[in-house]
Amino acid sequence: MKELNKAIFLDRDGVINDNSIAYYIHHLEDFKLNDGVLETLRCFLNKGYLLIVITNQGGIAKKQYTILNVNELHTYFKNILEENGIYLSAIYYCPHHPEISKCLCRKPGTLLFEKAIANFGIDPLKSYMIGDSEHDIIAAEKLNIKGIKVKSNANLFEEIKKTAFSYLLE
């Protein structure tokens, strides 16, 4: 029997990139990695974790930006990471907003996590979710993924060092 993979799931806005200038980040020029992100992701990769971003992008449903904008931003983001030797396994996003439509994929829903678990053969019990909102943590914990709540737009490495999960960075 093949051993299941372990993963670090990450929220995007506020965790990976700074969203203090605007709630919806969709312009390339507004996308700025938070301090400590590259160092943190490198640690996770070195420990054998898959890196998967799961993000709510309700601005699509609200017609603030398009799927094309999100895909362009994600390509830009992945290129920055790859230039630094960091590779994401996947980015999953929910384009819905609860004021407009109901769905199962928007956090605290679990559908995007379930897709990633199925697609990559992930063991939830060996995996973690890093988020800056209760919705991130609730969604993960519904599937027995350990949730790590961090402060929005802070140095990710320093935020994780302050938690009981600091061993992930050693």
Image (cartoon, rainbow, N blue to C red):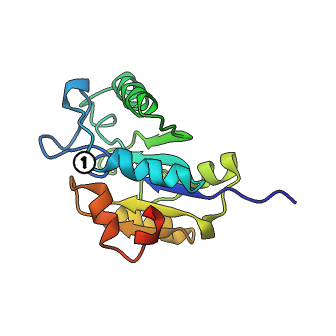
Name which residue lies at 23% across and 31% down: 64
Residue, far right = 1
Callout count? 1
* Residue 35 seen anywhere in this rendered image of the structure: yes
Residue at (46%, 70%) from the top-left corner? 167
Q: Report x, y in % for residue 59.
A: 28, 37
Q: Is residue 115 left or right of residue 104?
A: right
Determine which residue is flagged by label 1. Answer: 35
Label 1 is placed on what type of residue? Asp
Q: Does residue 139 lie above or below 39 as drawn? A: below
Name which residue lies at 22% across and 57% down.
Answer: 152
Between 145 and 95, the residue placed more toward the observer is 145
Q: Secondary structure at mark 1?
A: loop
* Percent coordinates x, y for residue 105 in the rendering: 49, 50
Classify residue 3 as left or right of residue 152. right
The quadrant the N terminus occupies is bottom right
Rendering coords of residue 113 (x, y %)? 55, 54
The spot of residue 122 in percent (x, y) is 66, 56
Q: Let me know if residue 111 appears in the view.
A: no
Q: Pick out the residue farthest to the front.
A: 170
Q: Quadrant of the C terminus?
A: bottom left
Tell me the residue at 67%/56% (across/down). 5
Q: In screen coordinates, is 22 left or right of 84?
A: left
